[in-house]
Image (cartoon, rainbow, N blue to C red):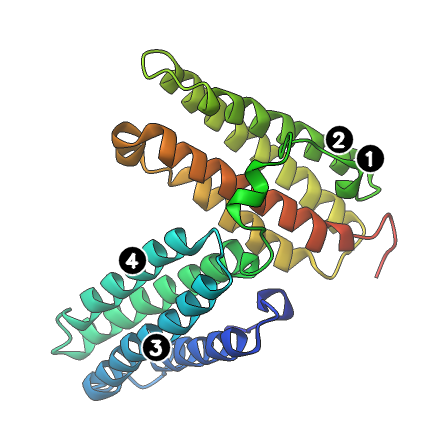
Amino acid sequence: MFQFTEDCRTGIKEIDAEHEYLFELLNRAYALASADIQKDQYRQLKDIIGELDNYAEQHFEHEEAYMEKIRDPELILQRSQHAYFREKILAFDFANIDDTEDQQHVLTDLVAFLAKWLYRHILGSDILIGKLPPLEEWMIRENPCEFTDDYLVGIDLIDKEHRELFRIVERADQLVKSFDSSSSYDKIMAILQELKEYTKEHFRDEEEYMESIRYEGLDAQKRAHEAFIDKLENVNLNEIEEHPEEYLQKLLEFLLGWLINHILYTDKKIPNGITY
């Protein structure tokens, strides 16, 4: 069964309660897919898909209304992720489930999609709700990419690698601000590739350290890291070609905001050599 763990909580009561119910629906689908005796589950599967669609619509409406109210800078990104989720659920609704074998295939795919999407969406996007300052406040800072003492976690290797991540993001940010369509595109893509590779290396080092001290928050950290890497690996190349400056600026704001939030609210909890 899939657990709605503490690291999945946004601290917003209504949103957390609705996320918990989405996990309940995920576990109902998992229970059907794991049943020992294979029988016709057409009605149960249809009911779960229908409830997922209806409840997700209700939840996304509440979540987006809350984000609009607080002028959250991630609202546009959230809307696109929500639309993608509903499109996928609609595809499951139209899938052929006339016989038990078809039903089993759809259930397996549904569970895999829900588990991956929910964890990555919540840990990669929803935990930022209400924690990022409005974009206009970000942009009036002299250098929003500066690594300050506020971000130090007190573990030398991790602090060193965090500082390097900020340097890479700052280089990308400077290129976007002086964007020249004839020369900047390839340079930015190269920096994004560098950021992806260095981030993977950093997360690997960080996870090895947490493993060495038997840190109880390791699993939650791994899920958060996967969500961030997933964002880097799914850069929309079409959007970059059509609206390069706008898309890249929003991407960098997300990446920087995620790093700041992750360091301040997650990495700072990592103990310095204390075992559990």
Residue linked to disc 3: 58
Of pointers 3 and 4, the one earlier in the residue sequence: 3
Looking at the rendering, which quadrant does residue 235 occupy?
top left
Residue 1 appears in the figure? no
Crowding near the residue tagged with mark 1, few <14, some 14–19, many ≥20 C-alpha atoms within 10 Å: few
Question: As shown in the figure, which amino acid type bears the numbered disc 1?
Answer: Asp
Residue linked to disc 2: 160
Of pointers 3 and 1, the one earlier in the residue sequence: 3
Task: Look at discs 3 and 2 and give the one toward the viewer.
Answer: 3
Of pointers 4 and 2, the one earlier in the residue sequence: 4
Which secondary structure lies at badge 2? helix
* Alpha-carbon span between mark 4 and mark 1: 40 Å
Tell me what residue is drawn at x 18 percent, y 72 percent: 93
Residue linked to disc 1: 156
* Alpha-carbon span between mark 2 and mark 1: 6 Å
Instruction: Check residue 84 in the rendering and tell me which mark sits there, or answer none.
Output: 4
Q: Where is residue 91 in the image (x, y as percent from the top left)?
A: 19, 65
